Amino acid sequence: MRKYEMMVIARPDLDEAGLQALSDKIAELITSNGGTVESQDAWKKQRLAYEIKHLREGFYSVFNFTGEPRTANELNRVLKITDEVVRFLIVRPAE
């Protein structure tokens, strides 16, 4: 199993329930593909460095998880088509 770190920027118009649903969806994707969620930072609203999809703000969260490469590939596939996600990045942290 490899360690991964994923940063997600969600739409700023989501409410608390929407953010929780998105967190649950991401955690379910990780666990259903053989991974485990190590930690997740709380959602924090911040101003974006530049406009993305006509948005100036977004909710940021960082997920640390372990999994196989297929776990990261499936997350990448699903998050690309998830409307609530503005941008995301999955990286393998330095060992």
Image (cartoon, grey):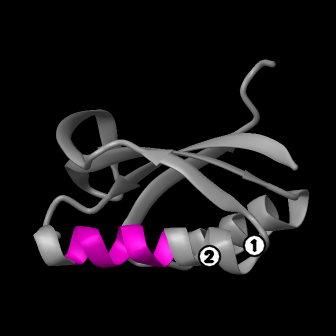
Q: Position of residue 57 (x, y in %)?
A: 19, 46
Q: Return the disc, 2 or 1, that comes first in the chain's sequence.
A: 2
Residue 2, compared with residue 72, is above or below; it is: above
Q: Which of 43 and 38 is in front in this view?
A: 38
In the orientation shown, which residue stands out farthest toward the top?
95
Q: Which residue is drawn at 53% across and 51% down?
A: 88
Tell me, yes or no, whether the highlighted magenta stretch contains residue 78: no
Write down the residue under mark 1.
Answer: 74
Q: Which amino acid does label 2 sit on?
A: Leu
Asked if residue 90 can be seen in this view, the reply is: yes
Q: Nearer the viewer, residue 78 or 93?
A: 93
SS at mark 1 in the image: helix
Q: Which of 17 and 52 is in front in this view?
A: 17
Q: Which of 18 and 39 is in front in this view?
A: 39
Residue 79, compared with residue 50, is above or below; it is: below
Q: Where is residue 14 in the image (x, y as percent from the top left)?
A: 17, 70
Which quarter of the figure has residue 21?
Answer: bottom left
Which quarter of the figure has residue 16?
Answer: bottom left
Say the numbered circle drawn on residue 29: 2
- Which stretch did the figure color magenta? 18-26
Q: Residue at x 19, y 37 (%)?
A: 46
Determine whether label 2 and label 1 are within 8 Å by CB: yes
Which quarter of the figure has residue 81?
Answer: bottom right
Tell me, yes or no, whether the highlighted magenta stretch contains residue 25: yes
Q: Where is residue 28 in the image (x, y as percent from the top left)?
A: 55, 78
